Image: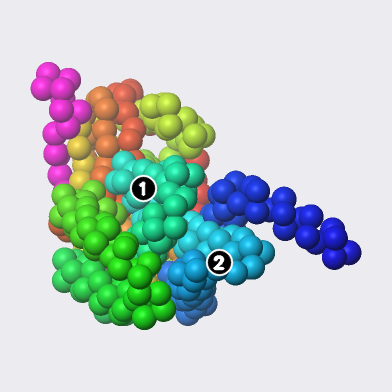
Amino acid sequence: MRAALQSTMTWARTRERHISAVAMAGGFAFDSYAFGRIDRPMTQLVFIAYLLAAGGTIAALHVLESRPEKGNPRTHTILVAAMQFALGALLSGFCVFYIRSAALAASWPFLLFMAAIFVGNEYFRAYTSRLVFAGLLFFFSLYSYAILLVPVLLARIGSLPFLLSGAVAVAVFFVYMKVLARLGHDRYRGARHQIAAGMLAITALINLFYFAKVFPPLPLVLSDAGVYHNVKRVGANFQVQGEDEPEAWRALFGIYPTLHMGPREKLYLYSAVFAPYRLTTAIEHRWEWYDPKSRSWSLQQRVRFSIQGGRADGYRAYSFCSEPKAGEWQVNIVTSDGRSIGRRRFSVQSAAQTPVLETKLLK
């Protein structure tokens, strides 16, 4: 039994780089399945547990690799895998909420950063580089979590909560770096300038994305949206009437639904936007028509209303456009300062009469 265990650990040490990547991917897969609402205490506890696990294993590896003798190789392998799993689980959780919170076009910087993590995980293998990479990845995780947490605690979104999130992340990371300096001063001293430069770069990049309105308006989530011929409230639910809709995956290939409009008809956009408990904010439906002459989207109307957080399936509302012109349309669902929550694309064709419609109840 002991010989088999030693053989297994030897095999693991020779493939440590690949095991680390698999452990990080395992974290991604687990959290994509497990995470629920951002305002649930259990979700916050899971995030905090992963942050503590990631910070603890990075510190333990730092102590181990600061010694002249690196200690038991088995311990090193286990700590590396545990660190990668915790960081991978954190990043997968952030990925879940970032993707939920916006159109894909607004979330691509975060997804690109995660791809860079996998590439970096393959090449940053020297001791100092490993500390730099792991430390900066931990700082990014702290920053990402603060961006999610602070709006929930303050029950508001906007520039002030975002800037406060950054201040919290920097302060916590500064204290953490002081702890690492005490645990292994020489090794930390060799990496501190790279860590400081990386921290500044990450902070600048996140702020650039935010103020350029690339980051999604966390923690808002578009729960449901659709374009219909008619929408009305029936008790606690909404009754909608619409045409057959193509499968959602077709939108990935630029195939959007076509609605056939009779004379003097209205077109409705229904949306349900989730916000955490107690959070109240304003959103807009921006109706845009594609002008083939100018080859650009022309704003036709904007409808603004307030939403209240707490409902699991999102705060429901709708707007309408009277007698929409034939052609390509899109309705952007955005915050009052223009941050994209979601979008619905469709085309309109004139028809002599309204086609047969299906009726369904949205709860």
Give the residue drawn at x 31%, y 41%: 105
From the viewer's perspective, is residue 15 above or below residue 85?
Answer: above
Which element type, helix, strand or loop, lies under badge 1?
helix
Instruction: Give the Cα separation between the discs numbered 2 and 1.
Output: 31 Å
Which residue has dot 2 on it? 70
Q: Kindly identify the amino acid type of the residue bearing the numbered disc 1.
A: Phe
Q: Can you give x and y, in whole percent of width and height, for residue 324 in the image?
A: 22, 34
Colouring mode (rainbow / by chain / secondary structure / one colour) = rainbow
Which residue has dot 1 on it? 113
Which element type, helix, strand or loop, lies under badge 2?
loop
Q: Can you give x and y, in whole percent of width and height, for residue 346 in the image?
A: 34, 33
Mark 2 or mark 1: whose residue is earlier in sequence: 2
**Which residues make up the magenta segment?**
290-309
Secondary structure character of the magenta stretch overall = strand
Furthest-top residue in this view: 293
Give the residue drawn at x 16%, y 49%: 212
Q: Nearer the viewer, residue 122 or 48?
A: 122
Q: Kindly identify the amino acid type of the residue bearing the numbered disc 2.
A: Lys
Q: Quadrant of residue 201?
A: bottom left
Q: Quadrant of residue 274?
A: bottom left
Q: Can you give x and y, in whole percent of width and height, for residue 351 in the image?
A: 33, 23
Give the residue drawn at x 72%, y 58%: 9
Question: Does the magenta run of residues contain 294?
Answer: yes
The crowding category of the residue bearing disc 2, from other C-alpha atoms within 10 Å (few below 14, some 14 to 19, many at least 20), is few
Give the residue drawn at x 20%, y 28%: 290
